[in-house]
Image (tube, grey):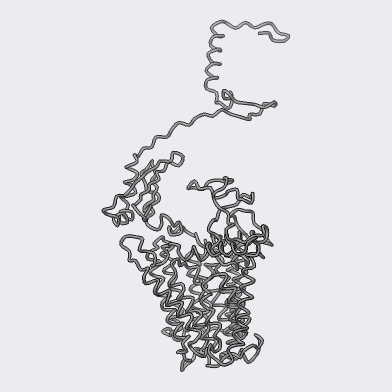
């Protein structure tokens, strides 16, 4: 080699051979990034734009399929459940996923039973990471995932704190064994059932829900029948009104914080946001127009390999919710303000429109209860009912889940505030019914106030019917968005009543006959449904004369009875009857005097029904 301005340098032959060998060794040891892969493609500026496909070495599982299956079947929980199918020919399958290093184990029973076991086994350690049986296989919500409904509200410190606030704020502390205290404890005892649900024990959870509901049904029927009388020694309030009011304001702010900061939006709230978008942006009814998972994928897969985001017929990439159109039209119309303010991205993301609507109807229910209490019992009852709403943990459970379940009770509360106006209560009970269909049972009862059979009942019933028609027309105006109203009505029926009346569910005792070893109570459920409908119709006639307290108690009783015979019951539904249960159980005994018809809601005579003290 030549060095500029210097004499040429000659290297000895052995040294030249040594350097050549070192260069070759360096080339072999250099990383691929330094040398470039064979077949790499570069652009004009030398940037790498394409690399050849290099097949990955197959990962050989350590366990065999049979070993993975046996690991799941030997779990006591799984073994106990599989034993129920003794004598049946079960189909077993184990599939290894090299990406996760997990075996997925499935077991099927013949006939309608279908898949009865699902589990996952870690190949490296043979450790069972998941084991689901019975209803947990098909129903992910039955698996007890932490915070799946409401997130932080399920934290024991938060939940028990609200329970303590509810009990200490409303209890008769001077008479610990009073009936009032028992009522409050029973209302809170539904928390035991929820605890088992959160642990994934669906069967125990559902069984434990029935005793409190049956007790409340009995108490509300007793009060509604007019059997309740003022005690000889009325309860003396423990806390001053100003303190309860301050606690109510504080708790209301705390609840809003829980909703906005540490909650989630379940499929129910998501469905209502979709429905609002369909009405406003696409000019179509929600029914039959929910996003499905049948189009082209446009999003990532979840841990189970399922891709929820698909291209819909409207050309948008949206998260699927194919069964989101099972609710009444008001459940979608109620979300229109939130959608207009916050919009919707098409994804199941934070959904601020759902948070806004849940908080809105939560506050409307709170304000309505305060007005009802003010009208029928003065300031103390107003603050008591408002405090009961904000302190009861199940009302926050609905708010933190951002479901649409507070819409119906909020509308019913305002309708009850207008109880002396046949048109007003008719319009609100119609809107409530076309949110959640349970309120349809209240139509005869609310029509009968104050007397179902009376000489002057005709004009009152006409005004009530007019309110029903107006509320129904407003609700079903969404069907007019479709080119054929008859087809739209048929689709509405199929997607709502048609599906809900036949849907299977493990979230009640009525559909457990599909599981071996469980009683088949479908016959009893059918008889109770008939009795419920007959009872709802009979309440138009009895009691012949009804006070506001009786209407409230019987309204709560009908809603509790409805929930008792539901095939699919859930804790979010507790808010449906709670306002009327709270009014009936916490209000002082009302004199047997009826609110006069038609006066304005703030009329002094209509308010003086309960001693304000």
Number of numbered discs overlaid on the protein picture: 0
Q: Quadrant of residue 365?
A: bottom right
Q: Quadrant of residue 450?
A: bottom right
Q: Is residue 250 left or right of residue 159?
A: right
Q: Nearer the viewer, residue 172 or 220?
A: 220
Percent coordinates x, y for residue 356 in the rendering: 63, 65
In the image shown, does 438 or 405 lie closer to the viewer? 438
Name of the residue lying farthest toward the left: 87
Instruction: Give percent across and percent down for residue 42.
Output: 64, 26
Q: Quadrant of the C terminus?
A: bottom right
* Residue occupying image coordinates x 52% and y 90%: 545
Looking at the image, which residue is at 43% across and 59% down?
142
502, above or below 551, in the image: above
Quadrant in the rendering for residue 58: top left
Q: Residue at x 69, y 62 (%)?
A: 341
Q: Position of residue 22 (x, y in %)?
A: 54, 15
Rendered location of residue 350, percent (x, y)? 60, 57
Q: Please tell me which residue lies in front, 388 or 501.
A: 501
In the drawing, does residue 126 fall left or right of residue 227?
A: left
Q: Is residue 88 above or below residue 537?
A: above
Q: Is residue 8 left or right of residue 122?
A: right
Quadrant housing the N terminus: top right
């Amino acid at each position: 080699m030549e060095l500029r301005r210097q004499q040429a340098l000659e290297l000895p032959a052995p040294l030249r051979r040594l350097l050549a060998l070192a260069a070759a060794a360096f080339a072999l040891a250099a990383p691929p990034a330094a040398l470039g892969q064979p077949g790499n493609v570069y652009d004009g500026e030398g940037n790498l734009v394409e690399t050849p496909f290099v097949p990955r070495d197959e990962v050989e599982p350590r366990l065999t399929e049979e070993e993975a299956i046996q690991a799941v079947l030997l779990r006591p929980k799984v073994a106990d459940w599989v034993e129920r199918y003794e004598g049946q020919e079960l189909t077993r399958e184990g599939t290894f996923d090299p990406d996760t290093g997990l075996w997925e184990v499935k077991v099927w029973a013949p006939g309608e039973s279908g898949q009865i076991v699902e589990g996952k086994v870690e190949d490296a350690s043979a450790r069972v990471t998941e084991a689901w049986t019975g209803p947990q296989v098909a129903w992910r919500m039955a698996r007890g995932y932490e915070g799946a409904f409401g997130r932080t509200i399920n934290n024991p410190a938060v939940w028990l704190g609200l329970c303590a606030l509810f009990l200490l704020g409303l209890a008769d502390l001077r008479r610990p064994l009073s009936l009032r205290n028992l009522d409050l404890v029973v209302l809170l005892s539904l928390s035991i059932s929820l605890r088992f649900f959160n642990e994934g024990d669906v069967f125990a959870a559902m069984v434990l829900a029935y005793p409190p509901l049956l007790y409340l049904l009995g108490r509300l029927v007793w009060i509604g029948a007019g059997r309740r009388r003022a005690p000889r020694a009325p309860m003396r309030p423990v806390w001053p009104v100003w303190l309860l009011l301050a606690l109510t304001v504080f708790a209301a702010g705390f609840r809003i914080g829980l909703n906005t900061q540490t909650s989630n939006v379940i499929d129910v709230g998501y469905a209502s946001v979709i429905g609002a978008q369909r009405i406003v942006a696409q000019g179509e009814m929600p029914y039959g127009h929910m996003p499905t998972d049948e189009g082209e994928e446009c999003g990532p897969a979840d841990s189970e390999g399922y891709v929820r985001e698909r291209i819909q017929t409207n050309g948008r990439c949206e998260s699927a919710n194919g069964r989101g159109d099972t609710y009444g039209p008001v459940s979608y119309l109620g979300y229109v303000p939130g959608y207009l303010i916050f919009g919707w991205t098409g994804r199941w993301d934070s959904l601020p429109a759902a948070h806004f609507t849940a908080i809105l109807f939560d506050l409307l229910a709170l304000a309505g209860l305060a007005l009802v209490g003010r009208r029928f019992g003065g300031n103390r009852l107003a603050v008591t009912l408002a405090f009961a709403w904000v302190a009861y943990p199940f009302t926050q459970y609905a708010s933190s889940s951002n479901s649409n379940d507070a819409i119906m009770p909020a509308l019913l509360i305002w309708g009850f505030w207008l109880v002396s106006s046949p048109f007003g209560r008719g319009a609100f009970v119609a809107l409530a019914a076309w949110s959640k269909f349970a309120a349809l049972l209240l139509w005869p009862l609310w029509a009968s106030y104050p007397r179902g059979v009376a000489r002057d009942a005709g004009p009152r019933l006409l005004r009530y019917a007019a309110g029903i028609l107006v509320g129904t027309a407003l609700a079903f105006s969404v069907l007019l968005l479709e080119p054929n109203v008859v087809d739209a009505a048929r689709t509405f029926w199929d997607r709502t009543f048609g599906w809900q009346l036949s849907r299977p569910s493990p979230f009640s005792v009525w559909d457990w006959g599909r599981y071996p070893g469980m009683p088949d109570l479908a016959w009893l459920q059918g008889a109770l449904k008939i009795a419920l409908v007959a009872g709802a119709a009979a309440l138009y006639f009895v009691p012949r004369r009804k006070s506001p307290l009786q209407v409230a108690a019987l309204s709560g009783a009908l809603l509790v009875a409805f929930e008792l015979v539901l095939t699919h019951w859930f804790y979010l539904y507790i808010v449906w009857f709670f306002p009327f249960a709270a009014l009936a159980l916490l209000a002082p005994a009302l004199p047997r005097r009826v609110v006069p018809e038609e006066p304005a809601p703030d009329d002094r005579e209509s308010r003086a029904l309960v001693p304000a003290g």
